[in-house]
Amino acid sequence: MQAIILQAPAAGGSPAYMQFVMIGLIFVVFYFFMIRPQMKKAKEAKKYMATLEKGSKIVTIGGIHGKIVEVQDTTFIIEVEGGNRLKIQKTAVSMDATNTLGQTS
């Protein structure tokens, strides 16, 4: 005589593929809310850096206001108040602060 034992499926147990679907959904949400906006912002900043030319008024990320007097490969020579000249990296220009220059001048 053999005993037949029947077991009920575990309550709330989901197949393994559902776990992969959930991980995939988390990645998609992460991409659209974190990665994509950051890539768009970096692209806009790169485009803005390419438009800067001699005579443009800028603000550095350190808060220094100046006017570009010379453009080099990776640096700018800027003239600040008093006629002093500073050599700064192109990446040191703040894109956000330059939008306020028209309002403060």
Image (cartoon, rainbow, N blue to C red):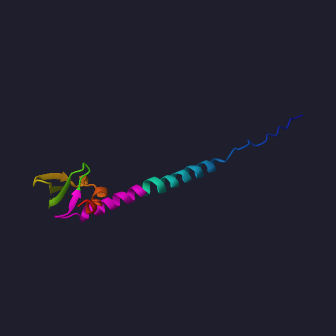
Q: Where is residue 50 drawn, in percent x and y?
A: 25, 63
* Quadrant where the image shows the C terminus: bottom left
Q: Where is residue 38 drawn, in percent x and y?
A: 39, 55
Name the residue: 66% across, 48% down.
15
Q: How many marks?
A: 0
* Quadrant where the image shows the N terminus: top right
In the displayed structure, would residue 51 be above or below residue 94?
below
Looking at the image, can residue 6 be seen?
Answer: yes
Q: Depth check: give the residue in front, 8 or 28.
A: 28
Residue most extreme to the front: 104
Name the residue: 47% across, 55% down.
33
For the stretch drawn in magenta, the main secondary structure is helix
Residue most extreme to the left: 83
> In terms of image quadrants, where is residue 98?
bottom left
> In terms of image quadrants, where is residue 69?
bottom left
Compared across the picture, whether 57 is left or right of 84 comes to right
Compared across the picture, whether 34 is left or right of 97 comes to right
Q: Is residue 41 magenta?
A: yes
Q: Depth check: give the residue in front, 53 or 102.
A: 102
Q: Is residue 74 magenta?
A: no
Q: Depth check: give the residue in front, 77 or 19.
A: 77
Looking at the image, can residue 74 be seen?
Answer: no
Q: Depth check: give the residue in front, 48 or 23.
A: 48
In the displayed structure, would residue 26 be above or below residue 70?
above
Q: What is the span of residues highlighted in magenta in the rendered image?
A: 37-58
Q: Where is residue 39 drawn, in percent x and y?
A: 38, 57
Q: Where is residue 12 drawn, in percent x and y?
A: 71, 44
Name the residue: 69% across, 44% down.
13
